[in-house]
Image (tube, grey):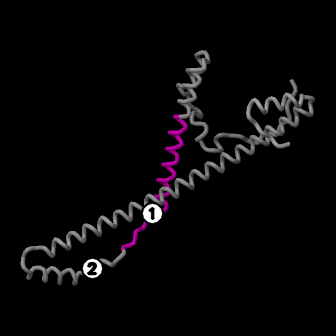
Amino acid sequence: MERSHLYLPTLSYAAMGHVYAPYHGSSSPALSTASSTSSKPEQIEELVSQQLHHLKMHYADEEQRYVDQMLLENPIVVERRAPPPLKTELAMDCRGSGSGSGSGSGSDVKDAQRQRAESCRKSRYNNKIKKAKLRFRHKFVSGQLKKSAVMLDTMRDVIAQAERQLLERGFPAATLERMRATFGLEMEQ
């Protein structure tokens, strides 16, 4: 048997993370049923949809883990807009409102202000968390896209090298063109 001299870089899924190979080292029920039964088109479509669903769930879990880790490493800090009132000011306000009409409207206004301030603080904090999560999600997705682009470029290089070797061995160029058209592959020569 003739040995091919293709340069195959290490195309290990382990180097890419286990996002692309979720069943590494384990036996999947979907894959074992596929090998044990005949390959009917509806079964293949069902298996593909199950696999895509599994990959999407796995990707979402990885993304959430990354975002949570980044939030732990980069805590959100929300500064107070106004310094908290001094204890002497609070004590004077309490004495002043105690000598008033006794209706308690001053304390109701202060309670309402305090509640408004607290809800504004919570809102600002939640908005900062949402922005940070979006930023970290974007960072995760762009990193995954860079990895995918590198893998795609590597695969294109391997295909181009294989085509060159086939042409050198006398494989018809028309057959290669037909294969490219069949599989929707656009290669630069």
Asked if the stretch drawn in magenta spans residue 40, the answer is: no
Q: Locate residue 6, reporting x and y percent.
A: 83, 37
Q: With respect to residue 36, does 29 lie above or below?
A: below
- Is 168 positioned to the left or the right of 31 in the image? right
**147 or 116, which is in the foreground?**
116
Q: With respect to residue 103, does 36 lie above or below?
A: above
Residue at x 65%, y 40% (from the top left corner)? 13
Q: With respect to residue 134, does 153 lie above or below?
A: above
Q: Quadrant of residue 32?
A: top right
Q: Locate residue 153, reporting x and y percent.
A: 74, 45
Label 1 element class: loop
Residue at x 56%, y 27% (from the top left corner)? 27
| Residue assigned mark 1 | 75
Label 2 element class: loop
Which circle's residue, 2 or 1, is located before the other in the chain? 1
Q: With respect to residue 84, does 15 lie above or below?
A: above
**Quadrant occupied by the C terminus:** top right
| Residue assigned mark 2 | 85
User: Please, what is the three-letter code of the amino acid marked with disc 2?
Assistant: Pro
- Is 76 positioned to the left or the right of 8 in the image? left
Q: Magenta-highlighted stretch: main secondary structure?
A: helix
Residue at x 49%, y 60% (from the top left corner)? 73
Which of labels 2 and 1 is toward the front?
Answer: 2
Q: Locate residue 89, reporting x and y percent.
A: 22, 83
The outermost residue toward the top is 38
- The magenta span reads 53-80
**54 or 127, which is in the foreground?**
127
- Is 48 positioned to the left or the right of 88 in the image? right
